[in-house]
Image (cartoon, helix red, strand yellow):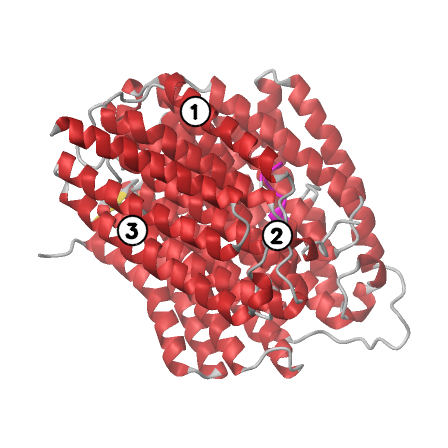
Amino acid sequence: MGFSSSDITVLLLVLTPLAGGILVTLARRKSLAELITISSASLVLVQVFLILSEVAVKKTLTAFGNSFYIDSFSAVILLPISLVGFVSVLYSKNYMGRQYDMGLVDDRHIVRYYQGLNAFLLSMLVVPITNNMGVMWVTVEATTLVSVLLIMLYFKENAIEAAWKYLIIATVGLSFALVGTVFFYYASINSGATGDAMDWTGMVQNSKSFNPALVMIAFVFIVVGYGTKAGLAPMHTWLPDAHSEAPTPVSALLSGVLLNCALYGIIRFRIVTSGAIGKSFPDELLVILAVVSIGIAAASIYFQKDMKRMLAYSSVEHMGLVSLGIGFGGLVGIYGAVLQIINHAIAKPLMFFASGTISQRYETKAMSKVRGIIKVMPVTGALFLIGGFALVGMPPFNIFLSEFLVLSAGFQGGQFVAVSIVIVFLAVTFAAFLRHLIGMVFGNPAAGMEREEMGRLAIIPMAILGLLVILFGFYIPGQLQALIHDTSVIINGGGFA
Amino acid sequence: MEQIQAGLMEISGAVLLIATFGVIARRGFTDWLDAYRLQSVVLAGVAAITAYVTGIWEIYIAAILTLGIKSIAIPKVLAHVTGRLGMEYKTETNPYLSLRASIMVSALLVALAYFLVQQLPFRTDTVAGIYLPVSLAQFFLGLLALVNRRTALSQVVGLLVIENGLFLFTLSLTHGVSLIIEMGIFADILVGIVISSILLFRMSRTFDSLDVGNLENLRDD
């Protein structure tokens, strides 16, 4: 039995973090564990770039028969996973190293942490490349379990609380997604599917003969299920706890990447659903959830006192914006939504890294106690400011562009009510977020705080992301544009570019 | 033969429902575990019958896994953890709803399950006719068990009951999903239970109780 070249591509991609995890387990030493994980994450990044360039030419890759299916949409999700994975691992060395020096964690914790990071990367990488919606469910549930382990690393009171809520709420939520998946599977069997009726490609091809009533209910279950995991309100309640109590690099991964993986599941099923019953029902549902999410995020950010919780709510807002773009539909709206997925994955980790560094330096996460970052840590402060401006959608930074596309798609689609409500919420978020941000960055630091950065390895990951935030504000590389365009066509046009 | 099969299915469906009510109505964690174990054994039997009727060999494996993991491994893990926590966790706090109200709500939920199955365009053979409403009822009652008590243990049991409902649901609607997914789901459950056991243990050490009322530190204000 021979392997085709794309079989090997997929196999290597999955085996790299797996091997990383095993090697970390064998190494049992802090310095080795760091080295191994940095290597595995950079190898994953390189492989994803190779896959991306291949997808750009061939449009789709299939491996192991039809078990794995990589199209432009998968590639658009793979990119943030590998990029944020890489910078998070890089940032971990400094961040966890400091925790280690302060005596908060010992060697056993560090080994467990790097095992977890590798496993987390592995489980997330499988989500966008599998063709089988059942396997996708299993891996999304696996991401929950791995990330719960990462959150409860320290066994502090708050971490236990956050981990428990996350475990229970996400698992219950995902059980709804499983019911939805089985409904789709059932519809697929009844429509006379050949091959594995659980395959996404098969579902899309047969979607016209699916039972409409069944598909409608199934999609509601999917949205509730994966929506819980994606942090769409009102199922978002676990999110601020988990994102704020996790170790900072894990927060970046949870927020920047994992939410996207869950939304990916919803969007894949939205394509099947629109093939069966048309776009209006799934899109209305998504728009309603999006408006609620953006509203709740605005209110929570307004009253927020904790830095990382504020960022977590900003993730709720951004996931809402992605759903909004998909819901408004049309090529423009979907293009904006896909761009928003990427922009969010760049800007949010930057902010989490900066806030992690800041809270280590100031020894607090309370925003009222953080003053004058720019005087204490000029580079971190500047990056924090840039990232913050980007998050609220201020031009000329990257998120402005995607938000603008999403909102203009709403106007074009005649959804004036939804757009006006969202604009009010965005304005509230804008003002409240900037008030918090400017309060922290400027002003006078407490007496006795020396001017000192937190080490080069803390700055480099932030600088990489910061440059991308600025760059993507006015220039998106042609290949990436083509990829996003193909993805929008896939989502808008019923499955295939 | 047909009649014996149908009779067996009806009885097993009834036992499953009764065991689910046991989780709602009984007071202690060990009682819940007993109910869950009974439910899982019956579920394994149901899977074996379905495998026999449909002739799909993969379902036999699912039946064996159900027996091994859900009726032996998981109760053992949970009993072990709570055993280490000491006696005081075995007696449980009262539910939010009184016992009588809980039973009433449960009965309504079961009725809702039967109603929903009639409304949906599902298959109408004997297997689906008997087990689909039971599986939905398990799902709903699991949710009720999850929110109805203040202890973390009942949340775990609630999750397990929900999961049993899902298993029965897939089994009766689509004769299970393919084996690899089934195995993945089992692996997820087992790992999930191990993780929640660790958390339960840590929770009792840190807060000195398993009352989820302790888990209210993280707020926005």
The Cα atoms of the two marked residues, 3 and 1, are separated by 28 Å
- Do dots 3 and 1 share one subunit? no
Tell me which residue sits at (41%, 18%) in the image: A278
**Crowd class of label 1 (few under 14; some 14 to 19; many from 20; radius 10 Å):** some
Q: Quarter-wise, where is residue A479 in the image? A: top left
Marks 3 and 1 close (CB-CB < 8 Å): no
Residue under pointer 1: A217
Q: Residue at x 59, y 74 (%)?
A: A96
Type of the residue with mark 2: Lys
Q: Does the magenta stretch include residue A325?
A: no
Q: Nearer the viewer, mark 1 or mark 2?
A: 1
The percent coordinates of residue A276 (x first, y second) are: 35, 20
Magenta residues, start to end? A232-239
The mark closer to the camera, 3 or 1, is 3
SS category of the residue bearing label 3? helix
Mark 2 belongs to which subunit? A
Task: Look at label 3 and name its amino acid.
Answer: Thr
Q: Position of residue A115 (x, y in %)?
A: 44, 70
Q: What residue type is labelled 1?
A: Ile
Q: How far apart are marks 1 and 2 (CA)?
A: 33 Å
Q: Is residue A285 visible?
A: yes
Q: Residue beneath label 2, please?
A: A348
Distance of mark 2 from mark 3, alpha carbons?
A: 42 Å
Q: Is residue B97 above or below residue A170?
A: above
